[in-house]
Each structure stands twice: as structure tokens, then as C-alpha cells.
Amino acid sequence: MVFSKIKNSLKGITSKKIESDDGTTKYIMFGGKGGVGKTTMSAATGIYCAEQGLKTVIVSTDPAHSLKDSFEQEFGHEPTKVNGFDNLYVVEIDPEAAMDQYKEKLKSQMDENPMMGGMLEEQLEMASLAPGTDESAAFDVFLKYMDGNEFDVVVFDTAPTGHTLRFLGLPEIMDKYMTKMIKFKKQMGGMMKMMKKFMPFGGDNEEVDYDKALEEMEVMKAKITKARKIMADPERTSFRLVVIPEEMSILESERAMKSLDKFKIPVDAVVVNQVIPADVECAFCKARRGLQETRLSMIEDKFGSKVIAQLELLKTEAKGVETLKEISHKIYGEEAETEEVKA
């Protein structure tokens, strides 16, 4: 229940020892219902990690990006350094840019695989129309950060729960798809070799094309498999749910935790945001606090096995580097030794 617990759990991910440990990137993901403060927690956590001397990037997978509002700075599809920091970066995945990169990849496959051109052209057309393709394209960018060691820590600011669960479910879906496609390519490659015995013309280009396409698919499948393993590894990945003391947020987070468990993604903390202080004086605030106390008991019942931290409702907007620094210090710093921290 105390903040020191979540601070200690974060230290397991952000300790400078990781630089001399296995040298692998660590991942922290924040999820929950829309409007509960995921972006604020992601930004504050990114700042804390950077202040520990870790090269950190905060990646937004939410199409409605808010990090630029939190930091009061423009960001883009590539890592942009946060003003005032030498080791803190932000990426806001642009679905259109991701889709353009996805199409370019398919076009390049069409150029290298002329005999598969028709099928790939249909796939290219479908990429513009199929629902959820923007998620697949964004996932392609997501894989880049799951497959590299450029950063010590990657903090993911995810979309609202439903979108995030679809996004996190993509590795399994894509893994099955890639397995089928690889099998299909191998069968086609075998057929082409048989046909060439009866068709002495044509040369070896087709075989080279198929071999290269198959190799690319094997590489992609390996990346997806690696991402699945990383997300299921509690030594490298931490998923944190952000809730507010309202029934809809609590119930949605409970469902999300069960779904994440199916994906074998570890949830190690529940952060309760926007808690009204216990010493409020106005009648309206007291009434709201009374209702929240009931919901806080509900949170204890449903998430009691997880680390729970409470952050009081801020008197100001959670924007600007200085405000975000204050929040990070309240959550992870020396002030974080009591059950509730006043903003």
C-alpha cells in the first residue's frame, strides 16, 4: 500500500546495475481506462529513470497522443530529446507514417518478388482498407524498440484498455500468420523447383526471389517471438495499471489484468490516481471523498495482491517538466514513504 513498495519495484527495473548486468533494455508499460493519467505516470516515470542516469525513451502507442501536451513540446515519429535532458527522449508513433513505412516494405517485396507481385499488390490494397491495419503498422514500429538495445529503459504510454489489449494481442496473431505464410512460401518454393525440371527456361531468379522472401519472413517471425518472450519476462517487463477511484475504471482495469494474464504479461503495480485528500473541508469534497473511500476499499479487494500506490488529486494541471518532476519525486523519491502523497 505504501509508495516505497512501488518505488522499490521500479528500482528493480531502473537500477543502474542493469548497465553492468545483462545489458538488456527494460520495459515499463502503463495502461488503463482513458483519462485516468497513464500519460502523466509514463512521463513522470521516464523523468525518474532519466534522473537515475539511464538513457530512456517514452513511446506513445496511443493514436491520441498527449505527451506533447504533458511536456509542452512537439514530438514526432522518431526519438526527440526532451528539453532540459541529455538522456530522455519521446516518440509518438504516427499511424500514417507507420502505414507509409509498411507500404514501402510491401512495395520493396513486390520489386524483389515479381512472381508474387499480384498477391502482394492485393495485400498492399488491403493494407489501406482493412480494419486494424494501423495497429499492425504501429506494431511494426513497436517491434523496433522491443528488438534493440539503444535505450536502457523504454516506457510505453499505451492507448485506452481495449485498444491496448488488441495491440498486445498482435504478437500471437502475427506469429500464427507468419507461420502459415512461411509454410506457404516453402510449399511454393518446392513447387517452383519441381516446375523448373520440366521448364528449362527462366533461370534462377525465381528461386532467389522466393528464398529472399522466405528469409525476410523468418526474420520477422523471430522478432515477434522475441517480443512475446520479453513481454512475458518479469525481469525485463513491467505492466502497471493506472486507475481512479471510480467503479468503471476499477472494473475495466480488473478485466484488463485478467486479459494481460492470458497474454502472460506481468502486472506488478496498480497506481491509484486523483485521490481526494482526506482532510478536505468543503461539503462537496467530503462527499466525494466518502465515495472514493468505498472505491478504495474495492480496489484493495480486487488488486490487493499487487503493489498499490495512491496519488492525490493535483491542484494544477499535470503539464510542464517541473510539475512532472515533482510528481516523479512524489511517487519514486524520498517523499514517497507514506500511503498518500499530497500534490
Image: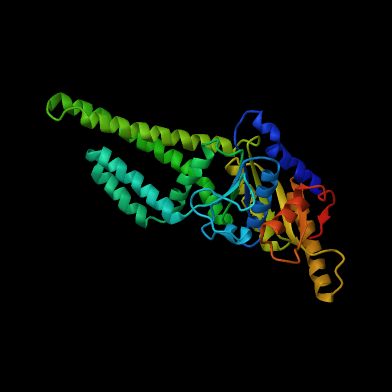
Q: Horizontal and vertical percent for residue 3? A: 79, 48
Q: Nearer the viewer, residue 73 or 118?
A: 73
Image coords of residue 262 (percent x, y): 59, 43
Residue 165 in view in this figure: yes
Q: Residue at x 51, y 34 (%)?
A: 226
Q: Decide: is 42 above or below 115.
A: below
Q: Is residue 288 left or right of residue 155?
A: right
Q: Quadrant of the C terminus?
A: bottom right
Look at 65% across and 40% down and name the residue there. Answer: 54
Please state if 109 lies on the left or on the right of 325 as rendered. left
The one of 156 and 87 positioned closer to us in this rendering = 87
- Residue sitting nearer the eye, 318 or 120: 318
Residue farthest top in this picture: 197
Question: Is residue 254 visible to the viewer in this orientation of the structure?
Answer: no
Q: Position of residue 87 (x, y in %)?
A: 62, 44
**At 64% across and 56% down in the image, what residue appears?**
38
Q: Is residue 114 rendered to the left or right of residue 313? A: left
Q: Quadrant of residue 321?
A: bottom right
> On the image, which quarter does residue 239 sit in?
top right
Judge whether 160 appears above or below 13 on screen.
below
- Measured from the top left, where is residue 200 in percent x and y? 12, 25
